[in-house]
């Protein structure tokens, strides 16, 4: 089956950068009319213009319900919503201030809830639609110095399951992607440290991080008719990271080249 979104309208939150932007591009290439929703300072309209005629940018802040509601009013009927906006500042448990905790949950969890709620109301009425949330491998594991992030991404699974359960009878599917380490500005600090990457990628069967486009492909699949009997699913897009128990790659049999492991 070919994935084709001709005639469909797609909204992507956090669409001006990284995974969301790659998803916007992929949906546009598949024929969709795309709305990139992002913070004003990220200039979503300029990001949309870089994608050509099929895209538009709208400034929103997912922490503010009224800004999401007004974007939905502006977009008209939306067939697919990718709930993707997120932040990931790091801090040890004891250094996680109340401000950081609240900001993280406001953007990553409450923002996702507001977006799903706005989409659900409209899709339920139309008896059709697909929502794809960006969760994370951190929805399951406990990566250090990310307690608020990990809590927010675990919470995304609660939103996923509840929304899939409630909206399934109305023909609305809700799924999530769970990316591992993907090369975006969010993870740039890792890519600036080859030694950290070498150690991180020892635990990834594919020996490398992923690209935003590789996550975008999974989002497209879950949003498409090719996934017509899939709802409530969380799809790992992590090069096998969550399947790995012990470090796999060693200098005995492989070598690390810049940003990936390769067998000798
Ligand atoms: N990069 C990774 O390794 C990785 C792994 C797992 C999950 N994720 C998740 O993927 C999603 C996208 O991250 P990315 O890596 O592409 O990062 P990114 O920083 O490139 O993109 C995130 C986007 O979200 C937007 N955003 C942040 N706060 C917002 C707000 N209040 N309102 C509206 N938009 C807001 C940002 O402006 C940005 O454009 C996030 O939810 C992130 O948690 C990323």
Image: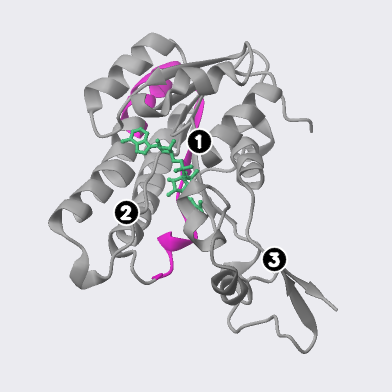
Residue 172, horizontal then vertical, whole percent: 48, 30
Left or right of residue 47: residue 83: left
User: Does the numbered disc 3 mark a residue whose Cβ is under 8 Å from ligand 1?
Assistant: no
Residue stretch rendered in magenta on the structure: 116-143
Residue 163, horizontal then vertical, whole percent: 38, 40
Nearest the viewer among 122 and 262 is 262
Disc nearer the start of the sequence (2/3): 2
Residue 201, horizontal then vertical, whole percent: 62, 71
- As measured in the structure, the alpha-carbon distance from the residue carrying label 2 to the one carrying label 1 is 20 Å
Q: How many marks can you see? A: 3
**Residue 17: mark in rendering:** 1
**Quarter of the render that holds ligand 1:** top left
Residue 29, horizontal then vertical, whole percent: 70, 24
Nearest the viewer among 176 and 215 is 215
At x 30%, y 32%, the residue is 62
Mark 2 surroundings within 10 Å by alpha-carbon count, few (fewer than 14), some (14 through 19), many (20 or more): many
Q: Which residue sits furthest right?
A: 264
Residue 227 vertical position relative to residue 87 in the rendered view, above or below:
above
Quadrant where the image shows the N terminus = top right
- As measured in the structure, the alpha-carbon distance from the residue carrying label 1 to the one carrying label 3 is 24 Å
User: Does the numbered disc 1 mark a residue whose Cβ is under 8 Å from ligand 1?
Assistant: yes
Q: Which residue sits furthest left?
A: 98
**Residue 258: mark in rendering:** 3
Disc nearer the start of the sequence (2/1): 1
Pointer 2 residue: 152
């Amino acid at each position: 089956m070919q994935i084709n979104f001709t005639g469909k309208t797609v909204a992507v939150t956090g669409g001006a950068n990284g995974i969301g932007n790659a998803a916007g591009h992929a949906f546009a290439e598949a024929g969709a009319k795309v709305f990139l929703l992002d913070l004003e300072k990220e200039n979503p309209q300029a990001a949309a213009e870089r994608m050509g005629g099929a895209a538009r940018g709208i400034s929103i802040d997912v922490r503010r319900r009224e800004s999401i509601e007004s974007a939905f009013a502006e977009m008209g009927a939306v067939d697919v919503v990718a709930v993707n906006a997120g932040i990931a500042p790091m801090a040890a448990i004891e250094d996680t201030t109340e401000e950081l905790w609240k900001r993280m949950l406001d953007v990553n969890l409450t923002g996702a809830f507001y977006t799903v709620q706005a989409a659900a109301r409209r899709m339920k009425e139309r008896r059709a639609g697909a929502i794809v949330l960006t969760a994370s491998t951190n929805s399951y594991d406990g990566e250090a110095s990310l307690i608020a992030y990990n809590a927010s991404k675990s919470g995304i699974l609660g939103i996923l399951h509840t929304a899939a359960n409630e909206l399934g009878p109305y023909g609305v599917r809700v799924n999530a992607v769970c990316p591992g380490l993907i090369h975006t500005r969010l993870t740039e600090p890792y890519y600036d440290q080859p030694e950290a990457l070498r150690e991180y990628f020892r635990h990834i069967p594919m020996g490398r991080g992923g690209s935003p486009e590789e996550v975008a492909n999974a989002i497209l699949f879950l949003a498409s008719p090719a996934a017509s009997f899939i709802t409530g699913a969380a799809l790992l897009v992590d090069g096998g990271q969550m399947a790995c128990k012990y470090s796999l790659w060693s200098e005995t049999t492989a070598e690390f080249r810049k940003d990936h492991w390769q067998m000798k």
